[in-house]
Amino acid sequence: MASGVVKKNGNEVFLSALEYRLLLVFINNPKSIITRSKLLDELRDAADEFVNYNTLTVHIKRLREKIENDPTKPQIPARSIQVNLPRAF
């Protein structure tokens, strides 16, 4: 992961810059409840531009689709965004 390469089951997963940053927030806060407000603060970019709630929801959905084994039964719950990532990450 330090190289910026994300793999799932041995296959490279291509993430957008924002999806990658979102994944890093989850990885750096294992077993923590991360509020949407905290996520928005973490995802603010160098130009101080921010992501809104709707955009955040879309990026979480897209990230789930790329990394979850079954996005319909996510390991990242929608409401609390409590993260329990598999050891593969």
Image (spheres, rainbow, N blue to C red):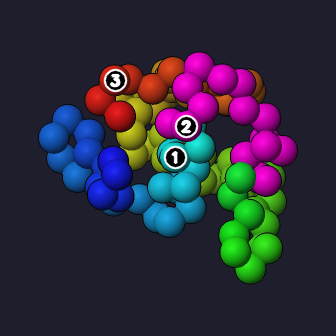
Badge 2 amino acid: Asn
**51 vs 66, nearest the viewer:** 51
- Check the image and name the residue furthest to the front: 2
To which residue does mark 2 refer? 28
Q: Callout 3: helix, strand or loop?
A: loop
**Where 4 sits versus 68, above or below?**
below
| Image location of residue 5, percent across then percent down | 29, 55
Which is more toward the observer, 1 or 73?
Answer: 1
Q: Earlier in the sequence, mark 3 or mark 2?
A: 2
The residue that mark 1 highlights is 24
* Magenta stretch in the rendered image: 27-41
- Whether residues under marks 1 and 2 lie with C-beta atoms below 8 angstroms apart, the answer is yes
- Using the numbered discs, state the Cα–Cα distance from disc 3 to disc 2 in whole angstroms: 13 Å
Q: Which residue is denoted by mark 3 in the rendering? A: 87
Q: In the rendered image of this protein, does residue 4 appear above or below residue 89?
A: below
How far apart marks 1 and 3 lie (CA) works out to 14 Å
Structural crowding at the residue carrying mark 2, measured as other residues with C-alpha within 10 Å and reported as few (<14), some (14–19) or many (≥20) = few
Instruction: Calculate the distance from the C-alpha at mark 1 to the C-alpha at mark 2.
Output: 6 Å
The picture places residue 31, in percent across and down from the top left corner, at 59, 20
CB atoms of marks 1 and 3 within 8 Å: no
Within 10 Å of disc 1 (Cα), the crowding (few <14, some 14-19, many 20+) is some
Inspect the magenta stretch and tell me whether residue 32 lies in it. yes
Q: Residue at x 35, y 29 (%)?
A: 69
Q: Tell me if I can see residue 77 in this picture.
A: no
Labelled pair 3, 2 in contact (Cβ < 8 Å): no
Side (left or right) of 82 relative to 88: right
Residue 8 position (above or below residue 6):
above
Instruction: Where is residue 64? Give x, y as percent.
Output: 48, 40
